[in-house]
Amino acid sequence: RPGMINLQQYHVEEMLIARALELGADIRWQHKVTAVTPHDAHATLTVETPDGTFDIEADWLVVADGARSPVRRHLCLDIEGRVFQDRFLIADVIMKADYPAERWFWFDPPFHPNQSVLLHKQSNNVWRIDFQLGWDADPEEEKKPEKVIPRLKAMLGDERPFELEWVSIYTFQCRRMTDFRHGRVLFVGDAAHQVSPFGARGANSGFQDADDLMWKLGLVIKGQASEKLLDTYAHDRQFAADENIMNSTRSTDFITPKSRTSKTFRNQVLALAKHHPFARKLVNSGRLSVPSFLTGSVLNTPDAEVFEGHMVPGAPMDDAPVQVDGQDAWLLDQVGKGFQLMLFVEAAPDARTLATLQTLKENAVPVNSLIVSRQALQVPGFQVLVDAQGWVAKRYDTQPGTTYLLRPDQHVLARWRSLDSARLQAAMARALGQVGEHA
């Protein structure tokens, strides 16, 4: 993986707003939702604006109003978990520095004794520095420049000029709602779950919530799947939230141990890591976020044949270099546009195979096909990916005829050693929530 660079939230929001406007979204500023009333077939929102208050009906309400979620509170819905009794100071600092583009973590450094400090790179010469303060620190006092600047000077250890861009205080929380779906009201992101910031799990899991929910909700809105499909959004993403909370809690316990035993373990790991490579893997400064393996999803079709590797049904897809129309590209950039099938071949598919692929394309819910080969092929009507280096074959354990069915959010749904129309149609029915009961 490349060195970690943190992209500031205001850049992400600017890009998302620009893209939403391109797609025709109606974004209304200075509108505040003050009440939500759920109904069987819709939700009613009361909206307060500078020009007055009005009610609006939504067929579906996606609640993404953040960790404090006024909508969640208004509906008296629970959120349970753990609030860590510790505080960190965030300081975004503009300065020119030649530090490597990787996270730096200090445990009990001389410039901030008995506490932890984190530094990582952001865009536009901005560096984010986090100072552990302890639970007894006064948040308002610690944010004052006269308190922050001496800490920064002690840490940097030189006279380089810097400018404070932003300062804040945060407290760790690892908790989630019991259920992300309440009829026509669906919760995503921080409104549904919160984790400590180590590992970039908060923002990434919010994007993953949206990736999971939107394809399912789209099918329901179009009448191509029943509302029961949305129960799998809650089931799958609650599982992912629990996984993120578990990893985030472990990181937080290592970074800020709360008992003598935990601190002894942490300090011994750090002492051993200085001299022994095995111990370095035990240093937990925040495992970086990765997508969850949704192997328990009822939408998966279990393997009926033997495969090597970890691209099992429910797995987030591994990436790999490919060529498209003679140009270097990446596998994941070619998938995620609806349901897709990957068929691995040595030569151009025969007429019967192409007819099967064409039938899938004409389904009520279309399945578009990618043909993957070690050599360039001409297959009119279908996209061909050239696995020139063999990385796709290696990571997906393929042989001629191997077939993968993929979800719109780049997870594996099913895989077989040969293309079979009946099995594919059955797997699609299952993926649309038409087969099997929610576990």
Image (tube, rainbow, N blue to C red):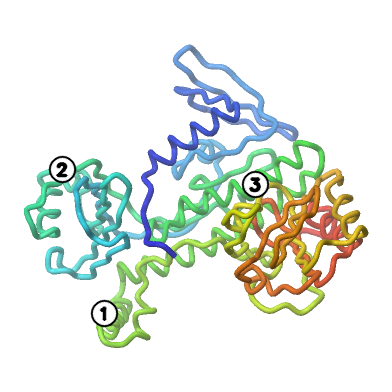
Q: CA distance from mark 3 to mark 2?
A: 41 Å
Q: Is residue 187 visible?
A: yes
Picture quadrant of residue 134: bottom left
Q: Is residue 156 left or right of residue 15?
A: left
State whether residue 318 is above or below residue 60.
Answer: below
Crowding near the residue tagged with mark 1, few <14, some 14–19, many ≥20 C-alpha atoms within 10 Å? some
Q: CA distance from mark 2 to mark 1?
A: 32 Å
Q: Which mark is residue 213?
A: 3
State whether residue 256 is above or below residue 78.
Answer: below
Picture quadrant of residue 425: bottom right
Name the spot of residue 69 as percent of width and height, x first: 48, 40
Name the spot of residue 116 as percent of width and height, x first: 24, 65
Q: Which mark is residue 222?
A: none
Q: Which residue is mark 2?
A: 144
Q: Which residue is mark 1?
A: 267
Name the spot of residue 413 as percent of width and height, x first: 73, 61
State whether residue 422 is above or below residue 396.
Answer: above
**Label 1 secondary element:** helix
Q: CA distance from mark 3 to mark 1?
A: 42 Å
The mark that comes first in sequence, 2 or 1, is: 2
Please tell me which residue is depicted at 80% across the width and 66% down the height of the picture: 347
